[in-house]
Image (cartoon, rainbow, N blue to C red):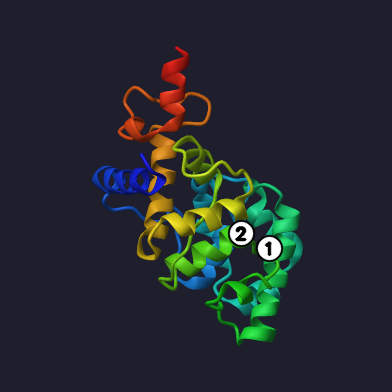
Amino acid sequence: MKKSERTEYILKTLDKIYPNVKCSLNYSNPLEMLIATQLSAQCTDARVNIVTEKLFKRYTNVIEYANADLSELEEYIKSAGFYKNKAKNIKACCSRLIEEYNGEVPDTMEELLTLPGTGRKTANLVLGDIFGKPAVVVDTHCIRLSNRLGLTTKQEPEKIEYELKKLIPPERQLKFCHQLVNHGRVRCIARKPDCINCELRDFCKYYNKKRKED
């Protein structure tokens, strides 16, 4: 089976399993999405949602973040891990938004990448979920599942992003990534994937290789 054919089957199956998916981070505006995604680095979305519940009530706009007392901001996000660096980046990011973008979150990859604490994963999530643009969000689930399914052999996030962009139709890219997150949590767990009950096993290179070895 060609990779393009396998991809089509995978997309159709994921649509049956997870027809309605969305980002698991809680936010109500572009700035909250940007900050929540920065906090999610090396942290679970569930933990980030706990942190932002209080954080977003304390700081409501770019000016408040830019002028925040660093030690106080650190306390609010402490349980998200790497809090000193994240707090520093949030302040610097919001300062840059004020100085360069009139306090608004920009809508291009090039501009988003100029913001402190913002890499391609964060930028793609903002572009996709906030601005409705084609976006491939490469997180740990995407790396693991796209390799196991045989959609890529790469491990570097940026290389995986570019390969998936060639395979996945633009209008399906963000939904596909959210579906991978769900499937990675339910079935394709890192250490012990539930291959027997996996709806994608017929198209999965990892499963078929494992079956031959057994």
User: For the C terminus, which image quadrant?
Assistant: top left
* 162 or 2: nearer the viewer: 2
Could you tell me residue 30's position as x and y percent? 49, 72
Q: Is residue 5 above or below residue 169?
A: above
Residue beneath disc 1: 117
- Whether pointer 2 and pointer 1 mark residues with C-beta atoms closer than 8 Å, the reply is yes
Residue 120, by quadrant, is bottom right
CA–CA distance in space, label 2 to label 1: 6 Å
Tell me where residue 172 sits by quadrant: bottom left
Q: Is residue 188 visible?
A: no
Residue under the point 48% across and 23% down: 192
In the picture provided, is 70 more to the left or to the right than 16?
Answer: right
Disc tally is 2
Q: Residue at x 31, y 25 (%)?
A: 197
Residue that label 2 marks: 38
Amino acid tagged 1: Gly
Residue 62, given in percent of the width and then of the height, sits at: 61, 77
- Of residues 116 and 11, the one drawn nearer to the viewer in this rendering: 11
Mark 2 residue type:
Gln
